[in-house]
Image (cartoon, rainbow, N blue to C red):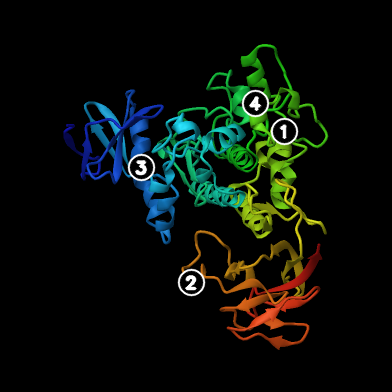
């Protein structure tokens, strides 16, 4: 039986671990604490003074900056952040919390767990590939399309917070993010290599598939060359865009059919570096996937005509254009993590459940047409579909359209961030603000909004207020005031009949 080792952390606190290695990462050997509430991970290679100083700063100053501020508890579920620095037998190590239970596979892969993944961590790579989704994953682990939008929101929020603190992850990829499509949760891991511009340089260039083109294109240059590009906040933004694209569309945005060099290694460097080209570029179509070369297990996702990136909705389409067309070779043009979070939140408001109960994706984004249908199974929407256009007061005191819509479906909730533009659905929400204030239901062949907690809800067409506990029938072209408060919204209803 393995013995328990007791050591002192750099901060003077006691640390215990069972001397029975439970796993090996790319750089570290990992051990459990006796109660399995935390792990201790030791670097296999000797670390220099700069590496130790970086870890002490990450577990000290930066930990306090994120977790010991107001609302700091929110981030504990979103990061697996190192908490202490230790040394043992001449090896430097870190202490970090154990991953939460939902980030481990509960079932094995298909064919009697052929891949032996039961009990292993849910690395994002398993879910970003059409092949794994189609061939290897148990259906109970896959989740639905809606959950991948929630995952994107969480990852964007986590990256936004790091960038706001002046930190870059430097190796953001689906290997360093755990996701759970069953619940829509995500956690960013491997935080011990954080980059602080001007102080702590990156340890690695990144993970293939996620390295920014400018880093690959200049890596042959000496480190001292001012033209050489290294991982930082701009390259994190590229990696974040790639990750969101892959989770939603299960293909890589740059890996298409174009061949730049007969030598595989040179072709890789060019196609992901200086010659990188978006596979769905609207005018240069030379990198479209060649379906004759695509295995059936990658379909239909590899077919950009059948499932184009526009199915993610207008807000994400705009950001993908900036990430993979305007900003692909111009890092300053790339969307920020904050912009991704906002676009994903607005896209969730455009989502509609598919009426085909056997549809694998179960959700789709409203396409702004009068005949919406699910892009995955082709099922058209049947019935009346209320679309709520959100308006808020501009500086002149007039209501203007916010380019924000809310789709209605039965038993869908409406929240405070819908009724007031000054409230955002982010990490700063209070417990009270997270509670629904109303819901929609199809009742007696009519769509109604049930007022649970909206003071002053008013039908502007009849000039009638709707008391809390009452319901309001929703009609085409109707104007409804959601709140009289500063930032309160007005909605104009648009009925799509199909």
Q: Quadrant of residue 265?
A: top right
Of residues 228 and 413, the one nearer the viewer is 413
Look at mark 4 in the image and give the residue it sits on: 272
Query: Alpha carbon of mark 2 to alpha carbon of mark 4: how far?
Result: 46 Å
Of residues 232 and 468, the one nearer the viewer is 468
Q: Secondary structure at mark 1?
A: loop
Give the mark, 4 or 3, whose residue is nearer the N terminus.
3
Left of 376 or right of it: where is 82?
left
Query: Alpha carbon of mark 1 to alpha carbon of mark 4: how far?
Result: 10 Å
**Residue 487 position (above or below residue 125):** below
Query: Alpha carbon of mark 3 to alpha carbon of mark 1: how far?
Result: 36 Å
Mark linked to residue 278:
1
Left of 168 or right of it: where is 270?
right
Query: Alpha carbon of mark 2 to alpha carbon of mark 1: how far?
Result: 43 Å
Left of 67 or right of it: where is 176?
right
For label 3, count other residues whose C-alpha is less than 10 Å away and answer few (under 14), some (14-19) or many (20+). Answer: many
**Residue 65 position (above or below residue 461):** above
Look at mark 3 in the image and give the residue it sits on: 82
For label 4, count other residues whose C-alpha is less than 10 Å away and answer few (under 14), some (14-19) or many (20+). Answer: many
Can residue 290 be seen here? The reply is no
3 vs 1, front mark: 1
Of residues 264 and 486, the one nearer the viewer is 264
Position in image of residue 137 (x %, y %)? 52, 37
Q: Secondary structure at mark 3?
A: loop
Mark 2–mark 1 CB contact (< 8 Å): no
Q: Residue at x 68, y 23 (%)?
A: 271
Left of 386 or right of it: where is 335?
left
């Amino acid at each position: 039986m393995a013995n328990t080792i007791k050591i002192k952390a750099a901060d003077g606190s006691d640390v215990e671990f069972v001397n029975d290695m439970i796993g090996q990462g790319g750089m570290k050997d990992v051990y459990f604490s006796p109660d399995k509430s935390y792990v201790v991970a030791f670097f296999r290679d000797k670390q220099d003074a700069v590496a130790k100083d970086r870890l002490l700063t990450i577990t000290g100053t930066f930990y306090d900056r994120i977790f010991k501020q107001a609302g700091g508890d929110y981030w504990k579920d979103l990061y697996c952040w190192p908490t202490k620095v230790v040394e043992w037998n001449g090896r430097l190590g870190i202490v970090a919390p154990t991953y939460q239970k939902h980030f481990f596979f509960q079932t094995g892969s298909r064919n009697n767990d052929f891949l032996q993944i039961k009990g292993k961590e849910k690395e994002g790579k398993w879910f970003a590939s059409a092949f794994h989704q189609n061939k290897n994953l148990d259906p109970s682990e896959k989740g639905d399309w809606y959950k991948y939008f929630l995952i994107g929101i969480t990852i964007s929020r986590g990256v936004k917070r790091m960038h706001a603190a002046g930190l870059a992850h430097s190796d953001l990829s689906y290997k360093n993010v755990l996701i759970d499509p069953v619940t829509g949760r995500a956690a960013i891991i491997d935080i011990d290599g954080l980059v602080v511009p001007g102080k702590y340089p990156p340890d690695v260039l990144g993970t293939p598939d996620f390295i920014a083109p400018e880093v690959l294109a200049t890596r042959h240059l000496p480190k001292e060359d001012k033209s050489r590009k290294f991982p930082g906040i701009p390259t994190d933004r590229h990696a974040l865009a790639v990750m969101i694209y892959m989770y939603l569309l299960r293909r890589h945005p740059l890996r298409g059919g174009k061949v730049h060099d007969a030598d595989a290694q040179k072709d890789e460097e060019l196609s992901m570096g200086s010659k990188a080209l978006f596979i769905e570029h609207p005018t240069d179509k030379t990198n479209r996937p060649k379906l004759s070369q695509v295995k059936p297990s990658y379909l239909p996702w590899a077919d950009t005509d059948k499932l184009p990136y526009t199915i993610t909705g207008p807000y994400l389409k705009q950001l993908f254009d900036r990430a993979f067309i305007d900003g692909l070779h111009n890092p300053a043009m790339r969307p920020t993590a904050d912009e991704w979070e906002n676009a994903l939140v607005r896209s969730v408001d455009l989502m509609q459940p598919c009426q085909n109960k056997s549809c694998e994706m179960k959700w789709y984004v409203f396409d702004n047409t009068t005949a919406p249908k699910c892009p995955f199974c082709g099922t058209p929407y049947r019935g009346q579909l209320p679309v709520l256009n959100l308006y808020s007061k501009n500086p002149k005191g007039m209501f203007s359209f916010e380019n924000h819509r809310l789709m209605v479906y039965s038993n869908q909730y409406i929240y405070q961030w819908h009724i007031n533009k000054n409230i955002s659905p982010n990490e700063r929400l209070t417990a009270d603000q997270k509670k629904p204030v109303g819901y929609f239901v199809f009742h007696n062949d009519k769509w109604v909004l049930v007022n649970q907690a909206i003071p002053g809800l008013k039908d502007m067409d009849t000039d009638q207020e709707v008391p809390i506990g009452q319901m309001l029938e929703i009609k085409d072209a109707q104007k409804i005031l959601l709140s009289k408060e500063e930032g309160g919204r007005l909605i104009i209803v648009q009925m799509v009949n199909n």
